Amino acid sequence: MAQAASVLSMLKLGRIDEQQATKDLLQCGYDKTAAALNTTITAADLDPSADPMLQAIFPGAELASGDFRKAAAAMKVVVNGYGGAGTIEYGGRDYHQNPRPDTDNKDFIVGQAIGASLEYAALRMKPLMVYVFSDGAVSANTSLQEDDGQGTAKFRWESDDSQTAASFILVYSPLGRPTLRNGAASQQLGTFRANGSVDTASSPFANSVTTLAELVVLNYLALHGEEGLFGTVLQNPRLGTGAAAAPYIAFNRIV
């Protein structure tokens, strides 16, 4: 993917002509195809239920649950190197006006899937980056409290909210605890206002999903020590490159 993006970027910048770009892209495709053909992957290799580690992480009937099985399938593919990235999507989270025990349980399931992914990476001794995001947020009714089912009074979620959000990245390395690139300043990129809304002027990606996607790519590259390729993988990123993008790298290299 990165090699193909680099070729297309050089073509757009006029560094190579169409003939050379075509040749390079064909070679890239051939190399990937040859690697795939030379790698034997069986059905059992991709089957979560055939993996003793996943059976231990999701005991009993948990692995048969749709919420956990799709997470396990993505974990199996990504952590074992059969795919570069995987997406686990959970619907039913546009849950305002639902009782708080129901909404908290839905969130808890997502948390279990995230924790299981990190645990599987640790058992397999493989590095892993988890990026969590949603397509919206909800606001609470501060005049309506209810028991969350665990003995804690919480406000009920009342309505959609386009002014708040919290995307985050979790990182695991078998080499030791990942370190922050810029210390405490890297723990949170962007800020909230006192009322809980996002300060849209606090960072280039606080009010731009496009730039937020760039941020994720930048940090993924940095985990491999390849942040220098940011401007090649993404042509003319809004975050800038080099020193301009450096403050937005959360973790030091783990791979």
Image (spheres, grey):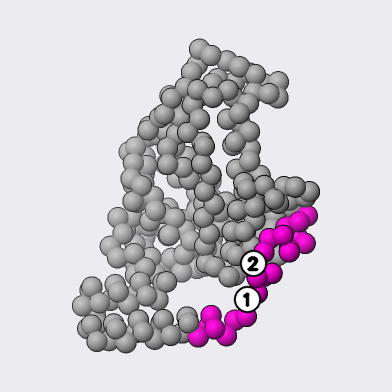
> In the rendered structure, are the residues bearing label 2 and label 1 in contact, judged by CB atoms less than 8 Å apart?
yes
Residue 94 appears left or right of 55: left
Side of 244 relative to 52 (left or right): left
The disc, 2 or 1, on the residue closer to the chain's N-terminal end is 1
Q: Quadrant of the C terminus?
A: bottom right
Residue 156 occupies quadrant: top right
Number of other residues with Cα within 10 Å of mark 1, as a class: few under 14, some 14 to 19, many 20 or more = few
Viewer-nearest residue: 157 or 232: 157
Q: Is residue 24 left or right of residue 178?
A: left
Q: Which residues are magenta?
A: 34-56
Residue position marked by numbered label 1 in the rendering: 41
- Residue 191 appears in view: no
- Percent position of residue 185, x then y: 49, 46
The circle drawn on residue 46 is: 2
Residue 144: x percent and y percent?
Answer: 53, 14
Q: Is residue 207 above or below residue 3?
A: above
Element assignment for label 2: helix
Q: Inspect the magenta stretch and tell me whether residue 42 lies in it.
A: yes
Against 235, is 216 above or below? above
